[in-house]
Image (cartoon, rainbow, N blue to C red):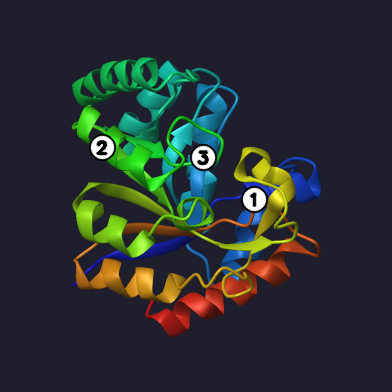
């Protein structure tokens, strides 16, 4: 039986609240509306990471990866907790330099028995579908933290990416995209529109079809809802998206 967990990538919650002020409270709130954890355990030091990991476990919640104060610590914690991947950690804007640095990170992660995953993102060296395909070819040992809406907002085809790289996905972010100022180009994507709860966008995204394609392809791992921008209590948006995913089959 496939093992799929549904969690939250809580960037948008941090924007709404100003920061994560109480991890345990956040976990309890998310569990109450049907989520199984957060994408990342974020900690200030090793003692904090141990404490938070213990609280996740005591609450019956989980996490997929770790974010430490340095990339090296994040790699060590992720390996120590038996998790699968870390995010790429290059700030390079040049595509070739970015790929070189990611390939180095992939080799380091392999020494620790984990993977590195690219998060495709608007305004980054890997924004469009063409750039994503070029990256996956240039970095064969890097997996994908796939964001459906970042790709769709750049006129990409999420279903095509699932078909081509489903076996290289270590995490999937699902959200929708609402274009509010169509006269503004993607070079100012943060003013062109906003990311929103599932089904609330206006570009014809079908996250349900993406989820069903993942399941049909045997995907095992996390699917995390991520709403970058909330205009009301994030728990209301997240409860809406959790119900959307239930109807989609998870």
Q: 4 or 245: which is nearer to us?
A: 245
In the image, residue 23 above or below residue 215: above
Compare marks 2 and 1 and give the one earlier in the sequence.
Answer: 1
Compare marks 3 and 1 and give the one earlier in the sequence.
Answer: 1
Q: Position of residue 135 (x, y in %)?
A: 30, 33
In the image, residue 23 above or below residue 249: above
Q: Residue at x 56, y 35 (%)?
A: 123
Looking at this rendering, what residue extends furthest in the bottom direction? 247
Marker disc for residue 41:
3
Q: Is residue 60 left or right of residue 161?
A: right
Q: Secondary structure at mark 3?
A: strand
Q: Residue at x 34, y 18 (%)?
A: 96
User: Is residue 139 in sight in this rendering?
Assistant: no
- Of badges 2 and 1, nearer the viewer stands 2
Compare marks 3 and 2 and give the one earlier in the sequence.
Answer: 3
Q: Quadrant of residue 109?
A: top left
Marker disc for residue 136:
2
Q: Position of residue 249 (x, y in %)?
A: 37, 80
Q: Secondary structure at mark 2?
A: helix
Q: CA distance from mark 2 to mark 1?
A: 37 Å
User: Is residue 131 in sight in this rendering?
Assistant: yes
């Amino acid at each position: 039986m496939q093992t799929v967990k549904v969690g939250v990538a809580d960037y948008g919650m941090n924007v709404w609240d100003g920061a994560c002020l109480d991890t345990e409270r956040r976990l309890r709130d998310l569990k109450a509306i049907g989520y199984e954890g957060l994408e990342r355990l974020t900690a200030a030091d090793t003692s904090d990471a141990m404490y938070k990991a213990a609280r996740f476990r005591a609450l019956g919640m989980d996490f997929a990866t770790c974010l430490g104060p340095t990339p090296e610590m994040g790699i060590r914690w992720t390996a120590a907790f038996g998790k699968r991947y870390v995010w790429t950690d290059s700030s390079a804007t040049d595509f070739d330099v970015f790929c070189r640095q990611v390939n180095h990170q992939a080799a380091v992660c392999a020494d620790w028995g984990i993977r590195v995953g690219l998060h495709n993102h608007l305004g980054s060296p890997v924004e469009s579908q063409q750039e994503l395909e070029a990256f996956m070819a240039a970095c064969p040992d890097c997996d994908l933290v796939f964001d459906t809406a970042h790709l769709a907002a750049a006129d990409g085809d999420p279903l095509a990416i699932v078909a081509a790289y489903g076996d290289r996905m270590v995490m999937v972010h699902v959200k929708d995209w609402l274009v509010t100022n169509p006269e503004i180009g993607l070079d100012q994507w943060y003013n062109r529109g906003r990311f929103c709860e599932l089904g609330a966008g206006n570009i014809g995204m079908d996250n349900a079809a993406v989820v069903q394609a993942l399941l049909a392809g045997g995907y095992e791992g996390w699917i995390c809802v991520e709403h970058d921008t909330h205009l009301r209590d994030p728990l209301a948006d997240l409860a809406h998206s959790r119900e959307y995913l239930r109807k989609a089959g998870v």
